[in-house]
Image (cartoon, rainbow, N blue to C red):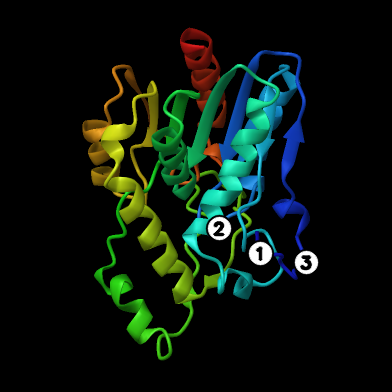
Amino acid sequence: MKKENINILPEGEPLSHIGDSNVGILFIHGFTGMPESMRDVAIYFADKGYHVELPRLRGHGTDNWRALKDVTYKDWEEDVDEAFLSLTKRADSLFVVGLSMGGTLTLYLAEKYPDDVKGIVLINPVIFVHDKLVRFVPILKYILPPHPGIGSDIKKDGVFEPAYKKFPVDAAYELFRLVEHVRKDLKKVVAPLLMVASEHDHLVPVIDKKHIYGNVSSEVKDIIVLEDSYHVATMDNDREKIIKGIEEWIQKNK
């Protein structure tokens, strides 16, 4: 694992909690975001006695967006592998909850560990990169400027997601590589699925959610529709609805 020479912000700090339940939950934040976007939800379940892991994906959560420059999608996969395997040592029933690119990584874990993942919760997940230019980044990266930030798509007044204001185009290409890698193996996903989808998401179109829902092999597939939140729904008006929905769904499927 590559060592990072970076300054991690308080919002970027990971969370790990040892509970007294037999259920463990891994929470995964999104691209250019930080653990802070999932922290309140994760803390709720930690306070309820669940084993919880909320890792910081490499290159994220720092005081410099350039930290993403030399990070690959394999690094992010290693990060969630490590957190998931940590949970396997202290919980029998394992669930994974991912926001945005965190949803992509959730699918990756469900594909890799079909016998160990008890259920997955996808909150506005990504499975396509719709910018056609991104596939040419290896050729154009020396002339393309940093990409403007995509964070803080939140409806709730006065709430802002801690996320990079810009990011290297190399990182966008790694997101592209990740979704290409995960999308081809969606049929391997057999774990029960809860899709949490905002009606008004300005970053990830509905086609991503429909494609995932229609192509996984899960026999149990449920949906929660969010009417009052945008993309970063875990920090938005429907946060309590998300928490309640996840809790009830885990109790039903554990």
Would you call the spot at circle 1 few (<14 residues within 10 Å), some (14-19), or many (20 or more)? few
Q: Compare marks 3 and 1 and give the one earlier in the sequence.
A: 1
- In the structure shown, which secondary structural element does the residue marked by tag 2 occupy? helix
Q: Compare marks 3 and 2 and give the one earlier in the sequence.
A: 3
Q: Amino acid at mark 3?
A: Asn
Alpha-carbon span between mark 3 and mark 1 = 15 Å
Residue that badge 2 annotates:
75
Q: Amino acid at mark 2?
A: Asp
The percent position of residue 52, horizontal first and vertical second, equals 68, 29
Give the number of the mark in front: 3 or 1: 1
User: Can residue 203 be spotted in the picture?
Assistant: no
Tell me the quarter of the picture where residue 163 sits: bottom right
Mark 2 and 1 residues: CB-CB less than 8 Å, in contact? yes
Nearest the eye: 246 or 25 = 25
Residue that badge 3 annotates:
7
- Which mark identifies residue 2? 1
- In the structure shown, which secondary structural element does the residue marked by tag 3 occupy? loop
The residue lying at 52 percent from left, 50 percent from top is 77
Alpha-carbon span between mark 2 and mark 1 = 8 Å
